[in-house]
Amino acid sequence: MLDVLKSLIVDFHAAGIPKGVIRRDLAVPLDVPKVISIIGPRRAGKTWFLYSLIDRLQQKVGIRNIVYINFEDERLRLDASALGLIVDAYQQTYPDNRLDQVHFFFDEIQEVPGWEKFVRRLVDTVSSHVFLSGSSAKLLGREIATSLRGRTLAYTLFPLSFRECLRFFGEEDSNPLNTGDRNRIVARFDRFLLAGGYPEVMGFDEATRVKTLQSYFEIMLYRDVVERFDVKRPHLVKDFARRLLSQNAQVFSVHKYYRELRSRNVRVTKDTLYAFVEHFVDACFAVEVGKCDASEAKRAQALKKYYVNDTGLLTACAFLPADRVGLLLESFVLLELRKRDARAGYFAGTNECDFVLMDKGTVSKAIQVCHELTDENRRRELGGVTSAMTRFGLKRGLILTRRQEENIRTEAGEVSVLPAWKWAFKKGAERIED
């Protein structure tokens, strides 16, 4: 195994990173003495994100001071006790290099049971420059935080954002003020809303895209939930997953689902169902959004909403109603917020507001999402955003639609109406502004 590891290290140094690495917007530090953990759903681009970090690093430290190991490589047969061979292999290959200057990149390291102790020993005795990736938020979030006792920083990488999608196709520098560019951006947005942002399927035809995303669903289901958490009833897990899909962007009641299962003569405890919810969130299959309330007790008791991690995965795996555009648009907005690490909750008062953004414990923004403002729904949609504005003392609110753009003055303050594509197209923090 030592010779295999030597070959992997040397081969990587000779080949370098693959061509065509797309820069992602997730900001990760390269020079802090912490273990950097990149978590997220399978196939979201974590490996290529590590490549992008390596590309930045090699310009400073040189490629030979970087070790990259993909633990899904079939040539590797390592258990926890043999992980130390990685350091031996590097040191025997480059005996003159200082180990404390080496940057270690371990991709999908959760494939090796007991890897946490090795990483901690590596950080304590060899090098503090360690980067990890994995497909389980619990694995690399909660568990490693306990094992490494404050030595780690965790970052979540989701499928491509809309702006990253434009970058993928070489259209990031398009000018929305130019008619031709704007039409291309809008067309790309319409496609993105249905197809989502998983990198591999970007250029696939519809049938291949759907089949590929459905295979992702099966892998996430069985490898990241059933196998990872040793679930004994996989058929029930699949039923639960399809329920999350069908109730995407809606409040989800475990109690209601429990009663339905009982009526179907399916025996299960509520604790098991609550554990399923946690498993799917831990596996980054679903994003949880809680109710925004000043009372911590009320927040804990309130039903939560769950959003599937990609609109393309949703359209490929769920039967959606005819008016699905509004549903997809809401999911799109939540995922764009999550991809830039914005904290979002929903507000339910006299009216409901889809999202309120929180900054350091204070609500800073109210966002409502609808396919189109019409005479029939205008009062309701405005009521949702203005009720949140009034409740949290905000002078401005935002409604995101498919196409419309206008400014509306209300008693609560000014409400800007923007097309969701234009909001998502703006760079960085500007996208949260209206």
Image (cartoon, grey):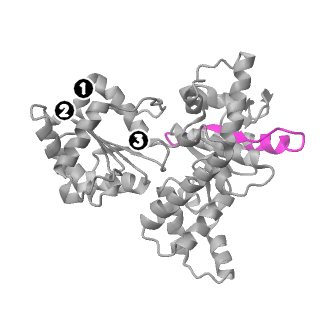
User: How far is the residue under mark 3 from the one under mark 2?
Assistant: 22 Å
91 up-or-down from 187: above or below? below
Residues 140 and 292: in front is 140
Q: Is residue 360 magenta?
A: yes
167 up-or-down from 320: above or below? above
Whether residue 342 can be seen here: no
Q: Is residue 362 left or right of residue 224?
A: right
The amino acid type of the residue labelled 3 equals Thr
Q: Residue at x 76, y 42 (%)?
A: 370
Q: Is residue 285 left or right of residue 141?
A: right
The residue beneath circle 3 is 47
The amino acid type of the residue labelled 1 equals Val
User: How far is the residue under mark 2 from the one under mark 1?
Assistant: 8 Å
Mark 3, other Cα within 10 Å: few <14 / some 14–19 / many ≥20 = some
From the top left corner, tell me how far across and down residue 152 is, in percent: 31, 45
From the top left corner, tell me how far across and down residue 224 is, in percent: 46, 60
The residue beneath circle 1 is 61
Residue at the left extreme, as displayed: 96
Magenta residues, as a range?
Answer: 358-384
The residue beneath circle 2 is 101
Residue at the top extreme, as displayed: 178
From the top left corner, tell me how far across and down residue 106 is, in percent: 31, 45
